[in-house]
Image (cartoon, grey):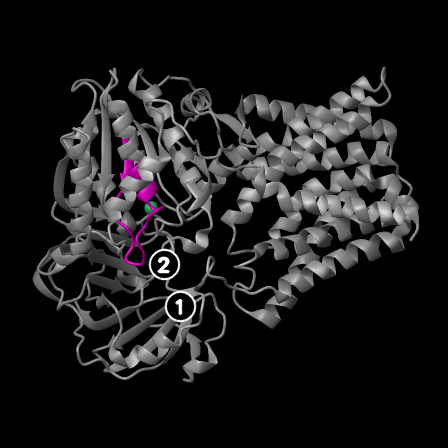
Amino acid sequence: MRRPVVLLAFVFIALLGALAAKGLLIQPPPIRAQNAPGEFDAKRAKERLAYILGNQRPHPSDTPESDLVRARLVGQLQQLGLSPIVRDQFACNELYKQRGVSCARVRNVIAILGPAAGKALLINAHYDSTPVGPGAADDGIGVATLLEVAANLKGKSLERPVILLFNEGEELGLIGARAFLADPLSRKVDALINMEARGVRGPVNMFETSHPNAAPIALFAAAVKNPVADSLGTDVYRLLPNYTDVNSFSERGWLTLNLAPIGNETRYHSAGDNVATLDPATLQHMGDQTQSLALALANGTPASANGDRIFMDVAGRTLISLPLVVGVGLLIGLMIGFLAVSVRRGGLLRAAVATIAAAISATLLSWLILAIIGAVRHGMFWRAHPIWTHLAVYAATIFATAVFLTLVGGRLDRTKLRPGFWFVFLVVGGSIGLVAPGGIIFFIFPPLIALLGIIVSRSWKLAELVGSLAAILFLYLTWGAMLGLLEELLNGGPMWIFATLGSLLIIPALIEARPLLASAGLRACSLVSGAAALAFCAASAAAPAYSADREQRFVIQHVADQTKGKSWWSILNDGAPIPVAYGHEWKRGELPFSDRPRWISDAPADPELHAPDVQPVSKVQSGDERTLTLRLVANGMEHVDLIAPPDARIRAAGVEGFVRPIDQDGGGKFSVSCFGRSCDGAILQVRTGRLNPVDFIVLGGIAGLPPTAMPFLTKRPNFARPQYNRDESIAFRTRRL
Ligand SMILES: [Zn+2]
């Protein structure tokens, strides 16, 4: 092989290696072997958590399992010399961006440190789990952290009260947080640290603040040693349908910081979220941050800095932040700067077209590759080994970039391609800024470094090259590291998005390799990068889809419509075909109570099961509104849900003291749910804007399946388990109210 081709192959491999390794840039600091007195001890925190979770059964609100967990939690607090209070409330909360209200009897556990008087810091975690798994990370990481921080803060003299809230009912719809807001104690609060989890390992991200964010960011930057946070993330989080207790607390306007790990979502809300899997380094990262923030907030009132800032960490080592206006000014200034350089040097249009064509064609090519592999493999074929699919996408991006830099870039050399690329980069940054202003932070420093290099190159010729390489390195440490976290966050896809986002890193790197690309020639460039892309496509197509660590989502349910006398088996999975061993006629479809597509087949009736019911207590009409008061009859079910059609116009629902408004936007069915032992006999109020009767589905469920499900349970594929929903027997009836 010719020497340039060998060098080129080396450059491509190095680039792919860097892209594969970028996830390692941000890791929680290694676990400390020895802790100084008062330092957060992750080992001790995890031992306490293991004790509290006991036999690690799911412990959703108002169940016998949650009673056991709470008793052990209260015991641990008493052992620390604290006097925990248990608040027992039957409460409801509205679901956010969904038309629903959720109710449960919740017992919040509260302990207070420091002086009795004055404004307080609230540190919040939830001790309930989903009905699917033990919740060792979600939110055991928060519970363990709260206890260890309590142990370390207890001996210290604090200037302000610190309220430790172990709330219950978060998983059902942030019910414990709503219940706490009805507690007079909540009136003392002016600052909040919230702890959550959407994974079991990796760094702990600070992904949400109160707004304006200048004060929480100043505090975070000063207090936290290993910050993982960026304002693109906080802006994008606000656009996503994810909720934590902060959604309920935010109406009070407290200074707020929200922390969570996101590593390995495949275990989240499943039996896989267990104590053994929770990475102690992740727990230590959560603990160190929370303890430093708590000490800062317990020994001084929150700073009253104003305005919005944009910020990002540099490879989890330090936090850079700027006022948003300064960021916007810099972005515009840099845009003008690179436009001027490009116009003087010429070739702006060609360089811009090459950049844009590379990014777009990389995205289209990746979409096509994924569609082809997906047509053969079905479901989340990348779930166990996402690295191969990511590398296939990045290799396809290298291929598209190498081709378009040569084809469209024509005879442009690096001095013309560089300013053209950075100009497009800044335009992309500005466009992202229109949707998520915090995203601008990623688009300022690399072009700034590159421009400084160009300016200095008037007196030192090599400065432009040095500046360009430094800009790419900085881009790798920030944008690259962020992409690594995004790969964790978007593990459910779409994967092609990494071609678009990765091209911002790959294009400037290949521009620097331009002389090599030119001497190797178009054919060699496309052959070498195309071969790499094909190799990773083959790896992506051949790698096992699921593993013991990263199992397939696979939920089996028996569903009975007891009004019509019809029963189904229902399987919720990632869309992959049903195993052949299941033998039945399985069809993709929906069931009357949910719009979610699932696998369905006919099932024998389950004579043991009785759908819950409602008894009307009163119906009162006033003006354009009807208020239905209903008594729930659980008939042995663990939860009762009233589901109404999209035109039911339900405006509010709940129990006395917690009748909560329902958002009418967004469309879809309405739901009013109650979970736990106390639902049987509970009196529920439902206010509807429809004066004629509404047909409600009254649905209930109980863990486990009828004996006829045995063949499905024994033949459930290896590496498949319930996630997000449990194996459950569901029965419903229709009631006109
Ligand atoms: Zn949670």
The answer to whether 3 appears left or right of 677 in the picture is: right
| Residue where numbered disc 1 is placed | 572
In the rendered structure, the answer to whether residue 89 lies left or right of residue 247 reads left
Name which residue type carries label 2: Tyr
Q: Nearer the viewer, residue 507 or 628?
A: 507
Q: Nearer the viewer, residue 162 or 588?
A: 162
Mark nearer the N terminus (1 vs 2): 1
Q: Is mark 2 within 8 Å of ligand 1?
A: no
Badge 1 vs badge 2, beta-carbon distance below 8 Å:
yes
Front residue of this view, candidates 621 and 610? 610
Could one spot residue 652 in this view of the protein? no
Q: Which mark is residue 724?
A: 2
Q: Quadrant of residue 152?
A: top left
Pick the quarter of the image with the C terminus.
bottom left
Q: Report the label total.
A: 2
Q: Give the x, y percent position of residue 479.
A: 61, 37
**Magenta span covers which residues?**
123-144
Q: Residue 476 falls in which quadrant of the image? A: top right
Relative height, residue 734 to residue 655 (above, below): below
Residue name at image x 34 percent, y 72 percent? 591
Left or right, 472 with respect to 322, comes to: right
Q: Is residue 552 above or below residue 602?
A: above
Residue occupying image coordinates x 54% and y 30%: 312
Residue 42 placed where, x, y %?
A: 36, 35
* Secondary element at image label 1: strand
Q: Residue furthest left?
A: 617
Q: Which mark is residue 582?
A: none
How far apart are the alpha carbons under marks 1 and 2? Answer: 10 Å
Q: Is residue 165 magenta?
A: no
